[in-house]
């Protein structure tokens, strides 16, 4: 990033749009802004009321698409009722789609072309590369088939040479499939779905889920999609919740913003 600034006088700029007052989304957006500043990038926050129309939101995105100071645009999901997330996401210029959720980037990823990759799957991949190195021939089981995590991560793991299985709501015996995985990634949003008995001994487990629950004492705590206390006794490696995938997601958002800035300024990703 220093080279980009020194050679071209450019500091990467990330615009984040939040519509409505969802408390969890507000926390995520503030954390992204803080980390953007810490990384030496510029943060542009757009906090819009829940009454914002789709036309107003699309007009803002169009302005940001043409703003030379903005290199990455992220619209925080979910959107309030009445706003079409697909239409909104696809309105972002593909070169500035740092969340990687637009159909052009998703399509490029699917056929193995360079693209901006969704941040959470990219974070999972980097964790796996760091811990496992060469993943060719490993059986990766992904529980959850969302466009946000499951599908793009499956594409990334295929590109790494893994044999990939995806479990979803219609899978007959998810536990049996999970037990086959050398790599097990769980991204369902169903708190503590995966028990220790679902995990192949020594497997590497990535827990993408995060849910806030109230304990018997009335306090709250964050849990994942995996029962950690059971899984940690079986798995060879496992990510904690919180503190595992979440920080990697933000790091990859900043990585994508830097990549987008380089592409827009120099025409090259590196």
Image (cartoon, rainbow, N blue to C red):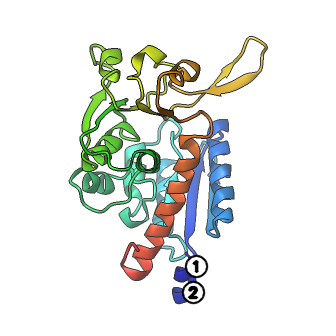
Residue 198 drawn at (x, y percent) = 40, 17
The answer to whether residue 22 shows anywhere in this view is: no
- Name the one closer to the observer, 139 or 17: 139
Q: Residue at x 50, y 25 (%)?
A: 225
Quadrant of the drawing holding the C terminus: bottom left
In which image quadrant can residue 265 be found?
bottom left
Dot label at residue 2: 1
Q: Quadrant of residue 108?
A: bottom left
Q: Nearer the viewer, residue 9 or 242?
A: 242
Q: How many marks?
A: 2
Q: Which mark is residue 38?
A: none
Residue 52 lies left or right of residue 134; in this view the side is right
Where does residue 159 sit, x and y in percent of width and height? Answer: 26, 50
Mark 2 vs 1: CB contact within 8 A: yes
Residue beneath disc 2: 6
Q: Position of residue 42 (x, y in %)?
A: 63, 69
Q: Residue at x 72, y 23 (%)?
A: 220
In percent of width and height, residue 210 lies at: 56, 31
At x 33%, y 44%, the residue is 152
Name the quadrant of the N terminus.
bottom right
Q: CA distance from mark 2 to mark 1?
A: 6 Å
Image quadrant where residue 151 sits? top left
Q: Check disc 2: other Cα within 10 Å, few if <14, some if 14-19, many if 20+.
A: few
What secondary structure is found at the residue carrying circle 2?
helix
Between 81 and 36, the one lying in front of the other is: 36
Identify the residue shown where x is 52% and y is 48%.
Answer: 53
Residue 119 seen from this side: yes
Q: Is residue 99 above or below residue 82?
A: below
Q: Residue furthest top?
A: 216
Residue 8 left/right relative to 101: right
Query: Which element type, helix, strand or loop, lies under badge 1?
Result: helix
Pointer 1 local density, CA inside 10 Å: few below 14, some 14–19, many at least 20: few
């Amino acid at each position: 990033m220093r080279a980009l600034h020194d050679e071209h006088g450019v500091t990467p700029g990330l615009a984040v749009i939040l519509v409505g007052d969802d408390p969890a989304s507000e926390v995520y957006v503030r954390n992204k802004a803080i980390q953007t500043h810490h990384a030496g990038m510029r943060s542009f926050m757009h906090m819009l009321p829940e009454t914002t129309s789709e036309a107003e939101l699309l007009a803002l995105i169009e302005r940001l698409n043409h703003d030379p100071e903005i290199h990455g645009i992220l619209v925080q999901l979910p959107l309030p009722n009445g706003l079409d997330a697909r239409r909104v996401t696809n309105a972002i210029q593909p070169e500035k789609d740092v969340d990687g959720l637009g159909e052009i980037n998703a399509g490029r990823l699917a056929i193995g072309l360079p693209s901006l990759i969704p941040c959470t799957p990219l974070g999972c991949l980097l964790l796996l590369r760091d811990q496992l190195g060469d993943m060719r021939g490993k059986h990766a089981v992904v529980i959850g088939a969302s466009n946000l995590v499951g599908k793009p991560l499956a594409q990334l793991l295929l590109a790494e040479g893994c044999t990939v299985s995806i479990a979803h709501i219609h899978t007959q015996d998810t536990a049996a499939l999970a037990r086959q995985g050398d790599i097990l990634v769980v991204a369902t949003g169903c708190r503590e779905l995966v028990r220790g008995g679902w995990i192949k001994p020594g497997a590497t487990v990535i827990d993408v889920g995060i849910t806030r629950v109230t304990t018997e004492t009335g306090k709250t705590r964050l849990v994942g999609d995996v029962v950690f206390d059971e899984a940690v006794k079986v798995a060879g490696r496992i990510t904690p919740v919180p503190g595992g995938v979440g920080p990697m997601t933000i790091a990859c958002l900043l990585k994508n913003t830097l990549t987008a800035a380089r592409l827009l300024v120099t025409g090259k990703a590196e």
